[in-house]
Amino acid sequence: MSEVALLNSLTGPSAYFFGYMGAASALVFANLGSAYGTAKAGVGLLSMGVMNPNLVMKNIIPVVMAGILGIYGLIVAVLLNGNIDEPSISGTGDSATICANAECFKYSDGFRALASGLCCGISGLGAGMAIGIVGDAGVRAVGQQEKLFVGMILILIFAEALGLYGLIVALVLAQG
């Protein structure tokens, strides 16, 4: 197999598809988790605020923590998009290659980008669901018994850590 044929077999349109799907997956799933967490915790916050309005600003923490998850997805999506190079075509006829050197965007790069995006996005979705559920129940409970505040914050920190773990693994994968 010639060097040109080998380079052509390592890349193709599907490599770019998987790369861009990784960026989209990171952003979409992380934002879904962020939106769910914000909405669910926000409903609990406002319900608690009807009975105890002086605690609303203190208990807004779950809403802020859920919003941070969307930023994780944005960071990974921008990073992955920056890693995808436009194809350069060189040569003509049967000797034409999509990439003139070994630095082209290969299938393995596309799969790595997809794995990275899914890692961040689905971790963000799970963390957002956890933050939303804990935030909803937690702020309502704190509205009735303020001593539960520290416990709620600890649970929220562990839920947020799930999204952070996904971000860290996504960044490691993206650097390949």
Image (cartoon, rainbow, N blue to C red):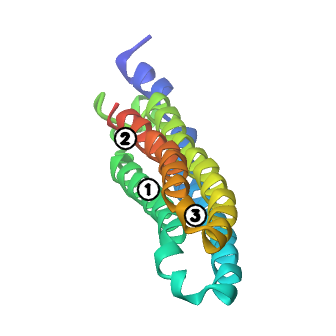
Badge number at residue 34:
3
Question: Viewed as shown, does residue 138 lie left or right of 108?
Answer: right
Q: Amino acid at mark 2?
A: Leu
Q: Nearer the viewer, residue 31 or 175?
A: 31
**In front of the other: label 1 or label 2?**
1
Return the residue at label 1: 72
Residue at 52% over, 43% down:
162
Residue 81, quarter of picture: bottom left
Give the residue drawn at x 62%, y 85%. 52
Vertical placement of 171 versus 129: above or below?
A: above
Dot 3: within a 10 Å radius of its alpha carbon, few (fewer than 14), some, or many (20 or more) residues?
many
Tell me residue 54's x, y (percent): 52, 87
Residue 135 image position (x, y, % from top left): 62, 63
- Whether residue 39 sits left or right of residue 80 in the image: it is right
User: Distance of mark 2 from mark 3, alpha carbons?
Assistant: 19 Å
What residue is shown with label 2? 171
